[in-house]
Image: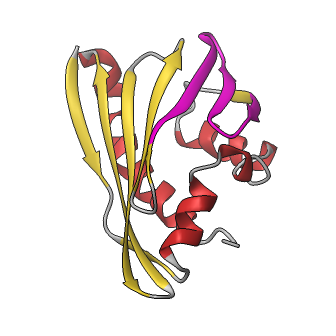
């Protein structure tokens, strides 16, 4: 097992930093956007993985991965208005820690960067490493488009 780091480009969200933080630091807000269509897109990106049965509460998301069973990601740390730290648990083929970092640009613009540290075996890294690199940026791009309120 080796540790790999994937970092997104810096993305801008046209909303106040506090509003963005409050929205992203509650996984219940994401459940309305993670639907069957989005899960199908994930499967197209990584055909070896079929994700289903997504459910969430304020601190965690649970879902099934074909061939592996239930997996979970959990918010383990919130630094108000600046950082959200998420870790994996369950039966994922790798362990990871994920940070969402937020900084104000103006009162109504926030810049965001995502960082993923993944602990995975060489075979898993060969299968999904490039996809994780792209996926971190795609996730950041998707987060810029959410209707923050």
Image quadrant where residue 114 sits: bottom left
- Quarter of the rendering occupied by the C terminus: bottom right
Residue name at image x 30 percent, y 20 percent: 120
- Which colour scheme appears in the figure? secondary structure
Residue name at image x 59 percent, y 24 percent: 72
Q: How many marks?
A: 0
Give the x, y percent position of residue 11: 39, 72
Front one among 103 and 143 = 103
Q: Would you say residue 41 sits in the magenta stretch?
A: no
| Relative horizontal placement of residue 84, taking residue 36 as reference (left or right) | left
- Quarter of the rendering occupied by the N terminus: top left
Give the x, y percent position of residue 71: 60, 19
Front one among 36 and 19 = 19
What stretch of residues is rendered in magenta? 53-77
Image quadrant where residue 116 sits: top left
Residue name at image x 55 percent, y 67 percent: 20
Q: Main secondary structure of the magenta part?
A: strand
Residue name at image x 66 percent, y 17 percent: 66
| Relative horizontal placement of residue 36, taking residue 86 as reference (left or right) | right
Task: Determine whether 18 is above or below 47 in the image.
Answer: below
Image quadrant where residue 128 sits: top left
Give the x, y percent position of residue 132: 38, 41
Task: Determine whether 136 is above or below 40 in the image.
Answer: below
Give the x, y percent position of residue 2: 19, 20
- Outermost residue toward the front? 80
Task: Determine whether 103 is above or below 139 in the image.
Answer: below
| Relative horizontal placement of residue 77, taking residue 59 as reference (left or right) | left
């Amino acid at each position: 097992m080796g540790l790999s780091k994937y970092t997104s480009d810096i993305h801008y969200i046209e909303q106040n930093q506090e509003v963005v933080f409050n929205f992203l630091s509650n996984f219940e807000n994401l459940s309305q956007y993670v639907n069957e269509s989005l899960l199908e897109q994930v499967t197209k990106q990584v055909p070896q993985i079929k994700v289903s049965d997504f459910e969430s509460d304020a601190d965690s998301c649970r879902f099934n991965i074909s061939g592996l069973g239930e997996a979970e990601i959990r918010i383990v740390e919130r630094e108000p208005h600046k950082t959200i730290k998420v870790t994996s648990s369950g039966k994922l083929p790798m362990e990871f820690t994920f940070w969402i970092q937020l900084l104000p640009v103006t009162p109504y613009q926030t810049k965001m960067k995502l960082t993923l540290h993944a602990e995975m075996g060489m075979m898993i890294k060969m299968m999904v490493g490039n996809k994780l690199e792209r996926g971190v940026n795609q996730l950041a791009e998707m987060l810029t488009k959410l209707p923050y309120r």
